[in-house]
Image: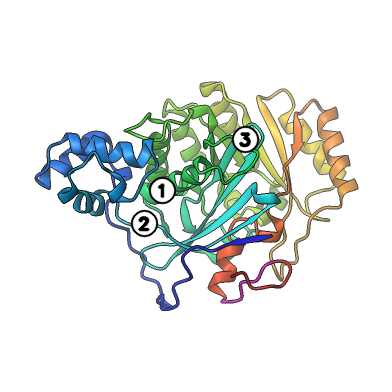
């Protein structure tokens, strides 16, 4: 594992955080809103487009590099339109630099994480939508931490823009120098922060200078199954992929693993997912963490296969990345292979997620939990520089 030196952790961060939203950033606003703000500052409206081109088009944050702006106004416009939202605490790399995890401190001391993953044909970033999570899934480090607050639209977008800059620098060896995919699978339940997440998606898919210019089809939004929000998302005229964190095919177990199931049962959640697929034409991804002796029994594979057979869906089995001290562990590989076989025999497209980032606390919430507990060490037991 490689430890990448960034800005050191802030040692005097307040112990008790006061949840508050950050200052406005250009990524919170559409282009018309940015122009109105620039005009209020006494500058011509076209300056908003210039600054936006730097941020979204060139991935530039340094005002001194914005040479098409008058020197006298660069700092002021940068401060007003691009206030610092994410302060790097730590960034770690593994897989020969193809996987990079960043821990950020927000303006109020809250911690969030992002993970960049490079492949030969694409670069993907997994971003957070909340600081913490209120869904209380017991096998998830973020769920164990509870919810601090929702992120702003710009705090969400800024993670992707920062990682786009990392990709553009050529730091992800063996991958294209351009971010191509964004998955909302980091900390938090995206659909519990609905308006800001939708705002972030629209920034990510709008072309520069409005946004980052990604394909809608290359955006994935994960949810534990907030049924009204899934149905609302289906009406947004977006072609993003819906990823449903199911983790159990039966209500008895899912009530325990995904507590929101006590409100919306498996049948109701899947019905909303199939409606989403029908309205958008997009295949629904079923996320299923494989947990030893908990949800990996052959009969549960068969039940899951019956529920999904003939639907526009794909199962993504996830080898559990256990959190320290947790009673949950990953399923053995032979059990995992049998689960895959049964699903495929039922006619359900199934793959096993690439297990990247284990040595850098790759599962969402693990790095933040370690930093919070002041016990951060890498998996080899050495404290990163």
> Dominant secondary structure of the magenta stretch?
loop
Q: Is residue 27 magenta?
A: no
Q: Which numbered tag is attached to residue 270?
A: 3
Give yes or no for contact between labels 1 and 2 (Cβ–Cβ under 8 Å): yes
Which is more N-terminal, label 3 or label 2?
A: 2
Residue drawn at x 76%, y 36% as measured from the top left: 351
Tell me the distance, in whole angstroms, between the alpha carbons under discs 2 and 3.
Answer: 37 Å
- Would residue 268 be seen by someone viewing this image from the given angle? no
Query: According to the image, label 2 marks what residue?
Result: 85
Which is more N-terminal, label 3 or label 1?
A: 1
Tell me the distance, in whole angstroms, between the alpha carbons under discs 1 and 3.
Answer: 32 Å
Residue drawn at x 9%, y 45% as measured from the top left: 42
- Is 68 placed above or below 188 here? above
| Residues shaded magenta | 374-378
Q: Is residue 375 magenta?
A: yes
Instruction: Where is residue 173? Give x, y as percent.
Output: 63, 43
Instruction: Where is residue 195? Give x, y as percent.
Output: 37, 43
Task: Give neighbour class at mark 3: few <14, some 14-19, many 20+ (Cα, 10 Å).
Answer: many
């Amino acid at each position: 594992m490689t430890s990448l030196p960034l800005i050191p952790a802030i040692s005097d961060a307040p112990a008790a955080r006061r949840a508050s939203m950050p200052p406005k950033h250009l990524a919170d606003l559409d282009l018309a809103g940015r122009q109105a703000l620039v005009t209020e500052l006494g500058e011509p409206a076209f300056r908003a487009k210039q600054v936006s081109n730097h941020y979204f088009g060139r991935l530039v944050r340094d005002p001194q590099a914005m040479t098409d702006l008058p020197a006298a106004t660069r700092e002021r416009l940068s401060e007003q339109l691009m206030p610092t939202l994410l302060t790097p605490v730590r960034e770690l790399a593994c897989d020969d630099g193809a996987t990079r995890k960043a821990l950020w401190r927000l303006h109020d001391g809250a911690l969030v994480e992002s993970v960049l993953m490079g492949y030969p044909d694409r670069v993907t970033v997994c971003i957070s939508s909340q600081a913490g999570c209120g869904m209380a899934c017991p096998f998830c480090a973020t769920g164990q931490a509870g919810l601090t607050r929702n992120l702003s639209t710009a705090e969400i977008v800024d993670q992707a823009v920062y990682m786009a800059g990392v990709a553009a620098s050529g730091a992800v060896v063996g991958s294209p120098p351009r971010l191509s995919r964004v998955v909302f699978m980091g900390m938090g339940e995206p659909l519990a922060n609905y308006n800001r997440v939708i705002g972030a998606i629209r920034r990510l898919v709008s072309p520069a200078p409005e946004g980052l210019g990604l394909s809608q089809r290359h955006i994935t939004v994960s949810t534990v199954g907030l049924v009204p929000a899934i149905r609302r998302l289906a009406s947004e005229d977006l072609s993003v992929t819906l990823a449903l964190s199911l983790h159990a095919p039966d209500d008895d177990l899912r009530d325990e693993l995904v507590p929101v199931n006590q409100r919306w049962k498996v049948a109701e959640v899947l019905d909303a997912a199939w409606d989403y697929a029908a309205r958008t034409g997009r295949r629904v991804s079923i996320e299923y963490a494989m947990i030893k002796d908990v949800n990996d029994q052959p009969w549960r594979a068969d039940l899951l296969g019956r529920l999904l057979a003939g639907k526009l869906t794909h199962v993504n089995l996830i080898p559990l990345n256990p959190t320290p001290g947790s009673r949950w562990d990953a399923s053995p590989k032979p059990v995992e292979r049998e689960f895959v076989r049964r699903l495929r025999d039922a006619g359900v497209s199934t793959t096993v997620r690439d297990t990247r980032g284990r040595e850098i606390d790759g599962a969402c919430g693990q790095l933040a939990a370690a930093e919070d507990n002041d016990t951060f060490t890498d998996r080899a037991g050495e404290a990163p520089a």
